[in-house]
Amino acid sequence: MKKALLTALAGLCFLQIGSADVDSLSQLFGPGKAVLDLDGDGFPEKPAVTIIIPDKPTARELALAADIAARVNFESLAVDFGLVRRESEVASRQSLPFPILIGNNLAWVREA
């Protein structure tokens, strides 16, 4: 039950953060949204998301963050091992293009 709730929360964050032309998660991984095509060749090279977990994450939150990071990295030509960050490592939401919040113990989630 908790895993389904965390997955739904992550999906909700994806949908809220994506632009209005995103109708499904498959469209989110197109160039220019969650992954960036830096040289215009049609193949995305750089993930454009930051996955934020609580400072003391549970095993389920870690597993969900790892799963989402792997899926984002599979959609790009380069692997970015720094996609997952703890809440205390991120200064502000405004500096993040596509933040994905994992779990309900984050201060940003409690504020919302």
Image (cartoon, grey):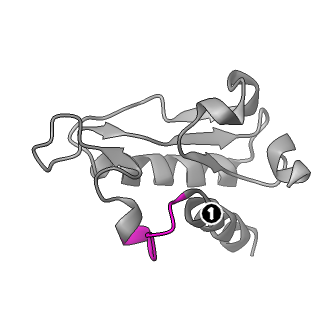
Q: What segment carries the magenta color?
A: 18-26
Name above or below for residue 5 compared with residue 35: below
Residue reaching furthest to the right: 111
Q: Which residue is mark 1?
A: 16
46 left or right, relative to 1: left
Query: Total marks drawn?
Result: 1
20 left or right, relative to 28: right
Depth check: 7 or 93 in front?
A: 93
Depth check: 110 or 64 in front?
A: 110
Q: Secondary structure at mark 1?
A: helix
Quadrant of the image containing the N terminus: bottom right
Q: Give the residue displayed 48% in from the left and 53% down from the top.
A: 68
Estimate how packed mark 1 is, as few (under 14), some (14 to 19) or many (20 or more) residues with alpha carbons within 10 Å: few
What's under tag 1, amino acid-wise?
Gln
Name above or below for residue 23 compared with residue 73: below
Residue 2 point in image, percent of width and height:
75, 68
Name above or below for residue 91 compared with residue 9: above
Residue 58 point in image, percent of width and height:
74, 47
Q: Quadrant of residue 44?
A: top left
Residue 112 point in image, percent of width and height:
85, 55
Residue 37 point in image, percent of width and height:
24, 42
Predominant secondary structure in magenta? loop
Q: Give the residue displayed 69% in from the left and 41% down from the top.
A: 53
Q: Give the residue displayed 59% in from the left and 56% down from the top.
A: 17
Q: Quick check: can you spot residue 91?
A: yes
